[in-house]
Image: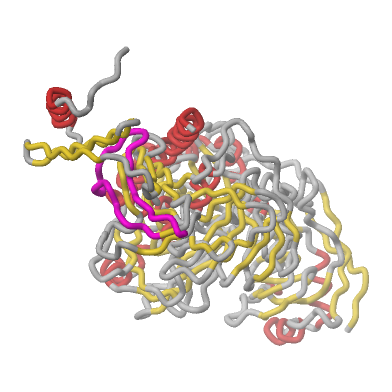
Amino acid sequence: MIEILETGPFNTVQDLGRPGYRDIGVSASGAMDSLAVRIGNSLVGNDEGAAVLEIQTFPFRLHFTDRTVFAVTGTDGNPVLDGIELPAWCAFTAEAGQILELRQPPKLARAYVCVAGGVDVPSVMGSRSTSLRGGFGGYAGRPLEKGDQITVGAASTNIPLPASGLAVVEPSIALQDVVPASPDGTLLIRALPAGEHGLFADDGKAFWDQTWRISSRSDRTGYRLSGDAIVPTQTVEMRSHGVVPGVIQVPPGGEPIVQMSDANTAGGYPKIAGVIECDLWRLGQARIGSRVQFVRSSHAEARAVEKAVERYIADLRQTIPMVKRALKAMA
Amino acid sequence: MSAIDFSDPKTIAFLTEALTAAGVDGLEISSASGNLRIVVSGGESHVSHGVKASSKPAVIKAPMAGIFQPRNSASADLPHAVAAADVLGFLRVGDVLVPLQAGHSGVLNRRLIEPGTLVGFGDALFEIEAQS
Amino acid sequence: MIATVHTHMQPLTVIPVVKDHARISAIGSRSFLLEAPGEFDLPAQRRIWALSQTLKGWTDLAEIIPGMTNLLAIFKKTPDDPAEVIDRLSKAWHGALSIDLAGKTIEIPVHYGGQYATDLPALCDLSGLSDREVIRIHHEATYRVFALGSAPGFGYLHGLDPRIYMPRKTVPSLKMAKGCVTIGGMQTGVAMLTGPNGWNSIGFADLQMFDPQSPTPAMMAPGDIVRFLPARIEL
């Protein structure tokens, strides 16, 4: 059992989401940084999609009532276990009674607490993700609150975690060859032109050329971008159509909105672009107030990045048990 | 199989050649009688033998083979105090990192291996002076 | 990436095919939106339903989301060659014969007027009709569920009488109640969640239409026929 000792608003139980129900109006939800969830679960010996805690407001503290293997991923800050600062992206064994504390990360937005056995809340429509808008899934369909007692599933016992723990080279480093970086720290996010791209002057030049600021009116549903407004050269009457996270819509005010994990399933504003899926985890770690610029990509590039990410995860899922077995044999 | 004499220059030359051929920067071997450390640099090998002192400091050894990555690559801050649970560095195997915990509280005096070196099982990595 | 599809007459269709072009565009790396040409009407939607049936046989698709005379196809992975995907979607659109879905009939009792009908006076002003006439026109029509979306279980209903069309608000109501019977442009529907809503409320329906614990969570499905019954009129 995990007991929540301290939490800010909007921290929730998430997994890789419930895609497949958008045709009945149900958002997929799921972690904003899905890569952190897949890696954290791999470290603690779970299936990639086991449920975790998504922490986006800090400080956050929890109490392990039992001996628990856990990993904190996603964040660039270090978790603190009973006052000792530990590396992130690393699985450790917490003893019964120990307290895990997550402080505000230096730059990134979200930390994931992954536990061996997974967070055991009921699966609703194939997922344990919290649907905040629908009020179902996750922990009682709502954000975590102080005093919540969360059940942890039975951990697979085949290969034990080494006593000193086990970590990974985090994706921003392991995947740096396929992740664009800008010298001034602006987050570069790759996107493809979408349906109404041609309605914006000079092929959307003003959209691609400027750096946008992620406004304070941003959350898991979407990021509103502040900058020089972009307006289509003609107005079109749009019929409601399905959308996915990453779609960049331009409402009448001219400031784009990027739909994120809790994206509405339907939309009707002109779409200027769509973020490639393999960059969504990076955008999911962008904080309010940070700067982002969109880089025009191609399907071929998106496919290449997707393959690199899948290769990285596949290698981890193969190497982690191998290393655990080697350490067990040599211990 | 008889014990290999690691103080034998021929053995050292052979190991040095093998390490150079393998592109490995160095090797450290601990045995009951002491330890051997070979660091390959620019085709030359530097060999140092240490004799174990009776009141020796705690040595953190590699739990398996991997590339040594201290958590803090600068050694200028040494020595400094460490707690038993502190992670001093990692051994890298692919994209997996094996944490190297201090295991003892005390003073971290020395890092015995250069960052980025491929080390083998049992190689000494850190030296910690136990707190009395 | 944007492509157009030119359709030809389908000799076997019962309902004449629109001889216009469909539009296919990408949303991100693995989703493609196909928009039917022509009017926002039942014949166009019937072809979308037919396309949806065809696409259910594609093993490389993760999700199919029919919208209002359009369809979003989400693939399992980013295609190596988007042109091939667009070509395949175009061919499927060419081959999509109009079908009619055998929907069930859903009757929704409505409390017209009253505290939830916050936009009824504005609709009377806009239409020049009395509140009684607006309500009669609304409940006498037969509606068709075109698609679900936007909120869990929310059905976009087609069949609204043009006399009571009312544009969506430019500034949404911040906290419209779940159950409000609303008009948005040429569509009508029942709000499924309490929250911000840009549609115009003329009444209230106290009917559970979405249950996440059920094997079929949404009561409505595309093709269903919906009638609103005036359970109470409070003016």
Residue at screen point 70% across, 44% down? A153
Q: Position of residue A85 (x, y in %)?
A: 49, 62
Specify the quadrant of the image occupied by residue A99: bottom right
Question: Is C111 displayed left or right of A9 in the figure?
Answer: right
Residue at screen point 23% across, 67% down? A183
Question: Is A311 displayed left or right of C224 in the figure?
Answer: left
Residue at screen point 50% across, 55% down? B85
State the extent of the magenta-drawn residues as a range: B107-132
Tell me if residue B60 can be seen.
yes
Q: Is residue B19 above or below residue C126?
A: above
Q: Position of residue A262 (x, y in %)?
A: 58, 61
Is C172 in front, or is B23?
A: B23
Most distant residue in the left direction:
B43
Most distant residue in the top direction:
B1
- Magenta run includes residue A203: no
> For the image shown, how many numbered marks are present on the structure?
0
Q: Coloring scheme of the render?
A: secondary structure
Q: Position of residue A308 (x, y in %)?
A: 35, 42
Residue at screen point 60% across, 82% down? C171
Is C163 in front, or is A229?
A: A229
Is C137 in front, or is A89?
A: A89
Q: Is residue C212 above or below residue A146?
A: above
Most distant residue in the right direction:
C232
Tell me if residue A297 can be seen.
no
Question: Is C56 displayed left or right of B73 in the figure?
Answer: right
Q: Is residue A162 above or below residue C170?
A: above
Q: Is residue C120 above or below residue A54?
A: below
Question: Is C199 displayed left or right of A227 in the figure?
Answer: right
Q: Position of residue A70 (x, y in %)?
A: 58, 50
Is A25 in front, or is C111?
A: A25
